[in-house]
Image: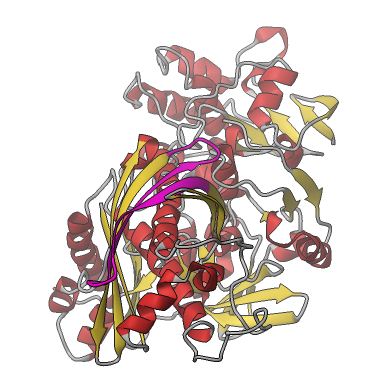
């Protein structure tokens, strides 16, 4: 069926099977492979993107459910000329990643979280990122990065 | 993992959803947030031939104060219920439990109607509605009916909703008194290994998450309290007569033990009792 | 794992034995089961199970290892494979009929072995669903076959008969299909619980 989605500001229209998962639409149809499939069972959050501004696990959403919606993926975070988003900048500066597999999902989850909680405590950041699992870092630097981004004053 | 093929229709109204269900019988399933159904479909444990998407029925997303009750539309997502001023003021246990379901991403999509209609004993909101003595409003071709939560959960993943009906509203009484929600899970997105909802409204009501094939009222505990037992004595009986599951996370024995511990904590918090 | 089911019917043991060995009469009461062929001593069929949104279909066969009309004891070996290839299971089902004051007690013990993903799961729900299916079977029996000598002797089933989940062409002797069905149904549920352990709260 016909599905129209705006992804990172660009409109797309495709004829899709209802069973196509949003993550597969983004990766395989649109070629936006920044979003990762981790567990595929709705736990790890590596597939997190923003759907109408809210973080969601795109492996658990059907592409048809996103019809008419606005989607933002990790590819949509950097500004023009490749300027990193403040959250990305903070992850880089505070070593908030090692292998990087969870990172796109972490950044998107953090973006949604900071939108709802612009001035969080450390505990709130830890809770706010509960939907994202990392096997490498032990989370410590991820939390530091998110707090730094919150305090940077650069978030819109 | 990829679901098996299915047809998809978006319902523009409850009537449209109902007529799709009538037409296709139990080969059709309603899709709300999809966070109970889609994972099952990805594992191909559920293979409905038609999904009727009711996720855009904004008229079913509300939290309303109706005097001595709070009415929650079935399509209210957990994030909205947790944030609702009406819910936080008048039935805070429900708002709190909604805020503990899964994780933020899940709460952005999952709905109270979806959770309750799915009827998983390991879900938090069914137990909360049970402890609150809530009522489920269901609509079908024969009209509207109201089902008390105590009669609603019939078995594992089985509720009183008929294949041609749709849950449209959850109604709970306002709770002025103490309450508590205790949930033990290793990670936020895991089901509770065991969970307890306690509502101190007169004689306390206690319900259990993941202690059987439906959400359960801890009647042994409630009766003990009504007979004058201390919370410690009552809580120690929480596992009696129950047959909780054994699985990769916990044995039945551990669950029975956990129930006594969590019921105790819940009762202490809900009733303000010292011990 | 071991599952036990028990039910009482209010007819004497010999009559219960006769009824329960008359597959043509009891087969319509077996929830979700269909006997497709009998090949010598082997009974082959499919069982459809539905629990909430989860459906499973098992293709299986069963043979009697033991049938003793004197002691009213039968042992059935059943094997099933999920048609979508998610698991398989074997059950040894022992059924014993005993005369009691109220009539006959039928005791069924199912020794269930599952392989593959299903090994990760627990028995509580299996037992529950198993009980439910046996309950449906017995309710149906009591309303029809056991309701009285003339209740169903002639003609097609009446409108108020419950459970018409299957069409059966039944030669003979799937008499312990109820526990078979229950066991296979219970097997079906294993996959579901496995799903729970693999996937998380949503």
Q: Give the image location of residue C167, x and y in percent.
A: 64, 63
Res B1 quadrant in image: top right
Residue C194 picture quarter: top left
Residue C153 location in percent, x, y? Answer: 58, 85
Membership of A87 in magenta stretch? no
Can residue B48 be seen from the camera position used here?
yes
Q: Main secondary structure of the magenta part?
A: strand
Image height check: is C4 above or below C158?
Answer: above
Q: In this view, does C41 lie above or below B96?
A: above
Q: Can residue B121 be seen in this view?
A: no
Q: Is residue A24 left or right of residue B255?
A: right
Toward the viewer: C18 or C28?
A: C18
Residue plotted at (80% across, 51% down) = B10
| Horizontal and vertical percent position of residue C70 | 24, 72
Judging depth in this view, the residue of C172 and C31 nearest the camera is C172
Q: Which residue is drawn at 66% across and 32% down?
A: A21
Residue numbers of the magenta segment: C58-87
Is C63 inside the magenta-drawn segment? yes
- Residue B257, given in percent of the width and then of the height, sits at 17, 61
Q: Nearer the viewer, residue B226 or B17?
A: B17
**In terms of depth relative to the viewer, which is nearer, A107 or B233?**
B233
Give the side of residue B154 with respect to residue A60, left or right: left
Residue at position x 41%, y 58% from top? C180
Which residue is rendered at x = 39% and y = 63% of the image?
A: C176
Residue B130 sits above or below residue B193 on the image: below
């Amino acid at each position: 069926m016909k599905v129209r989605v705006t992804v990172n500001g660009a409109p797309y229209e495709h004829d899709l099977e209802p069973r196509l998962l949003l993550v597969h639409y983004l990766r395989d149809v649109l070629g936006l492979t920044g979003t990762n499939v981790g567990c595929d069972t709705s736990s790890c959050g590596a597939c997190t993107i923003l759907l109408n501004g809210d973080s969601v696990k795109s492996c658990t959403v059907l592409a048809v459910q996103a019809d008419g919606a606005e989607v933002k993926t990790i590819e949509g975070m950097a500004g023009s000329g490749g300027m990193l988003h403040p959250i990305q900048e903070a992850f880089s500066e505070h070593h908030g990643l090692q292998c990087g597999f969870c990172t796109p999902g972490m950044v998107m989850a953090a973006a949604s979280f900071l939108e709802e909680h612009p001035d969080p405590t450390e505990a709130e950041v830890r809770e706010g990122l509960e939907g994202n699992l990392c096997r490498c870092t032990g989370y410590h630097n991820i939390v530091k990065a998110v707090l730094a981004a919150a305090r940077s004053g650069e978030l819109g | 993992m990829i679901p098996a093929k299915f047809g998809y229709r978006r319902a523009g109204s409850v009537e449209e959803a109902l007529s799709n269900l009538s037409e296709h019988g139990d080969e059709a399933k309603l899709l709300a947030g999809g966070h109970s159904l889609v994972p099952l479909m990805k594992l191909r444990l559920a293979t409905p031939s038609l999904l009727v998407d009711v996720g855009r029925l904004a008229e079913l997303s509300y939290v309303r104060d109706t005097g001595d009750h709070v009415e929650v539309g079935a399509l209210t997502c957990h994030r909205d219920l947790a944030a609702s001023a009406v819910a936080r003021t008048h039935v805070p246990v429900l708002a709190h439990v909604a805020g503990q379901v899964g994780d933020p991403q899940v709460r952005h999509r999952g709905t109270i109607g979806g959770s309750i209609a799915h009827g998983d004993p390991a879900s938090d909101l069914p137990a909360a509605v049970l402890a609150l003595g809530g009522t489920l409003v269901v609509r079908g071709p024969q009209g509207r009916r109201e089902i008390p939560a105590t009669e609603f959960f019939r078995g594992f993943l089985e509720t009183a909703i008929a294949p041609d009906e749709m849950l449209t509203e959850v109604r709970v009484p306002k709770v002025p008194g103490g309450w508590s929600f205790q949930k033990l899970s290793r990670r936020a997105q895991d089901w509770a290994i065991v969970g307890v909802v306690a509502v101190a409204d007169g004689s306390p009501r206690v319900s259990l998450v993941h202690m059987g094939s439906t959400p359960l009222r801890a009647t042994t505990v409630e009766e003990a309290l009504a007979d004058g037992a201390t919370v410690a004595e009552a809580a120690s009986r929480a596992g009696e007569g129950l047959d909780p599951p054994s699985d990769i996370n916990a044995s039945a024995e551990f669950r029975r033990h956990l129930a006594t511990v969590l019921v105790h904590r819940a009762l202490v918090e809900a009733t303000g009792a010292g011990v | 794992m071991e599952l036990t089911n028990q039910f009482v019917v209010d007819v004497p043991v010999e009559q219960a034995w006769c009824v329960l060995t008359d597959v043509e009469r009891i087969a319509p009461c077996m929830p979700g089961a269909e006997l497709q062929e009998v090949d010598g001593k082997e009974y082959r069929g499919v069982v459809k199970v539905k629990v909430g949104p989860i459906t499973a279909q098992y293709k299986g066969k069963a043979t009697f290892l033991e049938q003793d009309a004197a002691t009213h004891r039968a042992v059935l070996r059943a094997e099933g494979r999920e048609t979508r290839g998610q698991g398989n299971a074997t059950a040894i089902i022992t059924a014993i009929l005993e005369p009691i004051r109220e009539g006959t007690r039928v005791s069924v013990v199912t020794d269930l072995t599952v392989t593959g993903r299903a090994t990760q799961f627990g028995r509580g729900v299996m037992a529950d669903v198993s009980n439910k299916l046996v309950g449906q079977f017995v309710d149906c029996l009591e309303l029809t076959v056991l309701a009285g000598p003339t209740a169903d002797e002639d003609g097609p089933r009446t409108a108020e008969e419950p459970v018409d989940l299957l069409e059966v062409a039944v030669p003979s002797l799937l008499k312990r299909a109820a526990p078979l069905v229950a066991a296979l149904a219970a097997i079906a549920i294993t996959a579901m619980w496995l799903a729970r352990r693999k996937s998380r709260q949503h």
